[in-house]
Image (spheres, coloured by chain):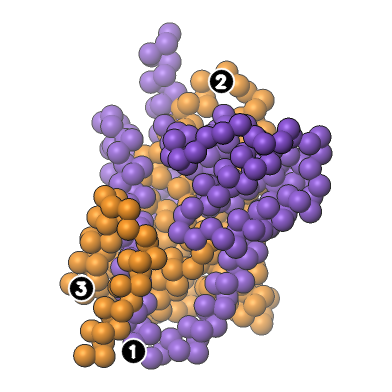
Amino acid sequence: MLNLNHSYFGFRMTPEVPPPKQIPLLDLIGVFFRVGVTSFGGSTAAWLYKEVVERRGWLDDEHFTTALTLAQVLPGANPVNLSIYIGSQLRGGIGGAAAAIGMVAPPFVIILILGYLYRQFGSSPVAHAVLAGLAAVGVGMTLTIGVKLARKVRRPIPIAIAVTLFVTVGVLHWPMIPMVLAMTPLSIGLEHLQAKKRTP
Amino acid sequence: MSDSRLLSLALVFAPLSLISFGGGQAIVAEMQHQVVDVHHWMSGPAFADLFAISRAAPGPSTLIAALIGWQVAGLGGAIAATLAIYIPSSLLVYAAVRWWHASKDSPWRTALERGLLPVAVGLVFAGALAVLEAAHVGALQIFTTVVAAALILYTRVSVYAIMGVTAAVFAGVQLA
């Protein structure tokens, strides 16, 4: 469902090197750090595929697709979740932590530099106008993610759950956390019943 | 910086971390509510500015937490907020990955995948609405949002090209 098929990446090849028995932690951090620096605009998954599956053969295709699906459905930022999955597959808990830190550290520094510039120049009307424009584009990006996900919601009950959350949290400003805590088990439970009905 | 501010930051972001299905977009609505209405750390437009920076910067959009922490309590605040937004969800993901591989044939795996999807969809749209409200948007912004969404969905135009043109247009309108 949520997983991107391999053609999404536009290339598919067998790994050039067989996977080593134990990948050094420094190599692991290095790869994720490099992807963290270079992956602009939501291209993280494609970069990781290239580095981890194609260049180094650390994971196979099927494994990577599972990682991508889990990273998307679970809470948390997709690139960070993907890093934890891959890192922990390769080197256990410490590998997951190393990969996530490597992935987050570069953009963390960059965003603080941008935040510093905002403090210096944020009061200028032009800076504020530019940011208002960029926020509008940002909302546009958010909408496209919503639309892409929403296309996969086709049956009445899941649609009702999505609409209920949007109306209560978005329009009526009900507190989000209790709403999510109520709707998530309901949604998963109903899907479980549905699956049971299909295959008794 | 006072410790109580760091603690408040952690208490705001750690619970949001666990419900950020679909990434940062899902929790923007609640983040804005907590930061602007509950804790009065900044105004609605200032929050919208930070949202804009976080979307224009590389990396996950949840890094807006670092910017909010930085504004509230300096570098310590940025680190505290970032740890609070990533550690709870990361531990959950780690546990889920282990469970996932331990229960290959469980029907709950499919139920989990399918059941979380509508939750993410509802929250993502609520988040978009929250930012539009926080920014006190005008007609030009709504127009920009719709055009940007259409371009990203239906063309191969780079997001950075769209952002560049938008920045130039908004600066031009302001200066004119």
Secondary structure at numbered mark 3? helix
Q: Which chain is purple?
A: A
Sort mark 3 into few (<14), some (14-19) or many (20+) by Cα contacts within 10 Å: few
Viewer-proximal residue, B169 or B27? B169
Is B12 located above or below residue A128 in the figure? above
Q: Which residue is mark 3?
A: B140
Q: Chain of mark 2?
A: B
- Specify the amino acid type for callout 2: Ser
Residue A158: image location, x then y, percent: 32, 34
Residue A71: image location, x then y, percent: 54, 42
Task: Give the CA distance from mark 2 to mark 1.
Answer: 56 Å
Task: Give the CA distance from mark 2 to mark 3.
Answer: 50 Å
Colour applied to chain B: orange
Task: Give the CA distance from mark 1 to mark 3.
Answer: 16 Å
Is B143 located above or below residue B49 in the figure? above
Viewer-proximal residue, B111 or A49? A49
- Say which mark, if any, is on residue A125: 1
Is residue B18 visible in this depiction of the protein? no
Is B166 located above or below residue B123 in the figure? below
**Disc 2 with disc 1 on a shared chain:** no
Secondary structure at numbered mark 2? loop
Q: Which residue is mark 2?
A: B106
